[in-house]
Amino acid sequence: MNYQTQHHASCFYFVNEEMFLYSFHKECVYMVPWIMLIIFVMIILGGFIAYRSMKVQQDIYNKTGKHPKGYYLNKGLAIGIPLGIPFGIIMDNVSIGIPIVVAIGFAIGSAWEKKHEDELRPLTKEEEELKRKTFLFLLGLGVIGFIVFAAGYLLRN
């Protein structure tokens, strides 16, 4: 087997041909698998919530023929967020590029929302509950991300 050794902070990782990480230091052995597991679980949960949300909205749209309030705003944001990273890379500062393009996406979404105002309906109870669960999921994701970042930072120093 062909192994490459990489030094990262206080941890040595050995990367084999399949790009699996192996670490032999006490503080690093548990870090890599747990982070990967947390990320994997959050991706699966996020996919489930997104699928459920799309299914609920599609079912209600099929019944009423109208989109929920905020639908076009979300579409504008969905366009702005992926464009923010390349825009930030062009500006040589991703942390500034993303908010600028998200603001543009928000403006586009707001304009679409006003244009299609007669095609919108209020959120149903099920959609409001789903929106609340999505918010709580994203809040939890942020907290877990902060904890993992802080743990990595503290273990490194």
Image (cartoon, rainbow, N blue to C red):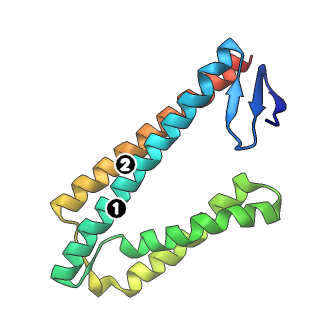
Q: Residue 24: x percent and y percent?
A: 71, 18
The type of residue carrying mark 2 is Phe
Find disc 2 in the rendering and name its residue. 135
How many numbered marks have been drawn onto this rendered protein structure?
2
Which residue is more in the foreground, 43 or 118?
43
Q: Position of residue 9 (x, y in %)?
A: 79, 24
Amino acid at dot 1: Tyr
Q: Quadrant of the C terminus?
A: top right
| Image spot of residue 36 (x, y percent) | 56, 36
**Residue at image mark 1:** 51
Whole-number angstrom distance, CA of label 2 to CA of label 1: 15 Å
Q: Which mark is residue 34?
A: none
Residue at point 83%, 58% (across, down)? 92
Residue 156: quadrant of the picture: top right
Q: Is 105 on the left or on the right of 44, as rendered?
A: right
Q: Give the answer, above or below, for where 142 lies relative to 9.
A: below
Give the percent coordinates (x, y) of residue 3: 81, 34
Q: Nearer the viewer, residue 100 or 9?
A: 9
Image quarter of residue 123: bottom left
Q: Nearer the viewer, mark 2 or mark 1?
A: 1
Q: Secondary structure at mark 1?
A: helix
Q: Residue at x 40, y 55 (%)?
A: 47
Residue appearing at x 27%, y 70% in the figure: 57
Horizontal side of residue 60 vs 90, given as left or right: left
Mark 1 Cα shell of 10 Å, populated few (<14), some (14-19), many (≥20) = few
- In this rendering, the answer to whether 5 lies above or below 70 is above
| Side (left or right) of 110 relative to 25 | left
Indicate the quadrant containing the N terminus: top left, top right, bottom left or bottom right: top right
Residue at 71% over, 60% down: 97
Q: Is residue 52 left or right of residue 77?
A: left
Foreground pick, 141 / 95: 141
